[in-house]
Image: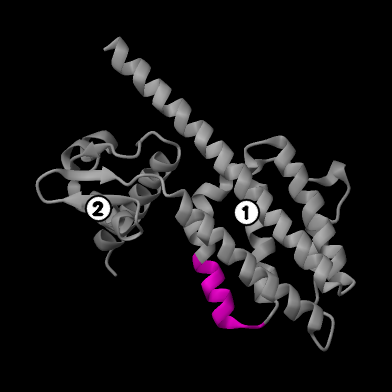
Amino acid sequence: MNTVSSKANMLAEHLYSRLKDDIFNFRLLAGERFTESEMAQRYGVSRTPLRDALYRLEREGYLTVAFRSGWSVRPFDFERFEQLYDLRVILEQAAVHAICDAEHPVDLSELQAIWLVSPEERLTDGAQVSMLDEAFHQALVQATGNAEMARVHAEVTEKIRIIRRLDFTKEDRIAATYEEHGRILRKLMERKEIQAGMLLKSHIESSKAEVRKITLHMLYAARQRLGGADAAA
């Protein structure tokens, strides 16, 4: 790959992340229409890498495009995200079964070193804890040794990542994650499958409910800001 092509790909990746972040932080609202020219001016880029990013988001279901009316943001699909969270439960409970049923104890020492720590040793940065949380759940699935299960779980993780991070914008949710992961790990170490599975399901359900609540609040606040701006204009 030549230097020019590499830079174009990096720019398209950067624009993809910025656009996705604007959608999920409600700087681009559901139903909002825009043209490629408007977005190119907004981000200060040419239309070619922008178009690559837009079509990627269209394939992922975040945007729609029409020949005459340009681009628009799809309505926020809570049902789709909840289905993805439900799929997580199925995959991760299967992982719990595999870990507890394994012939030899599964090595969970790396997870223990991160999550079974005193309150004083816990991280407080939401972005860091979000990444560690994602790694925790991926590690459980990878511990099964089932490559296909891990692949599907990774795809689900990617699809919910940008909304899932909202769960770590509140201090009490960071603390709850440490507590809940700790309880899950202890039951896994004891090979208590039923209890570990129940704790895991409750943990994911709590995260799903919290993310929905935060998202609704952010969406309402964004609409209020937009309404105020329109009134001022």
Q: Crowdedness of circle 1 by 10 Å Cα count: few (<14), some, many (20+)?
A: few
Report which residue position mark 1 lands on: 131
* Amino acid identity at mark 1: Met
Residue type at the position of mark 2: Pro
- Other residues around mark 2 within 10 Å, as few (<14) / some (14–19) / many (≥20): many
Asked if the stretch drawn in magenta spans residue 147, the answer is yes
Q: Nearer the viewer, mark 2 or mark 1?
A: 1
Task: Give the colour scheme shown.
Answer: one colour
Could you tell me how far apart the alpha carbons at marks 2 and 1 are, in whole angstroms? 28 Å
Report the magenta residues as a range: 145-155
Residue where numbered disc 2 is placed: 49
Main secondary structure of the magenta stretch = helix
Q: In the picture provided, is 170 more to the left or to the right than 31?
A: right
User: Quarter-wise, where is residue 186 in the image?
Assistant: bottom right
Q: Residue visible at 52% across and 61% down?
A: 84
| Residues tagged 2 and 1 counted as in contact (Cβ below 8 A) | no
Mark carried by residue 226:
none
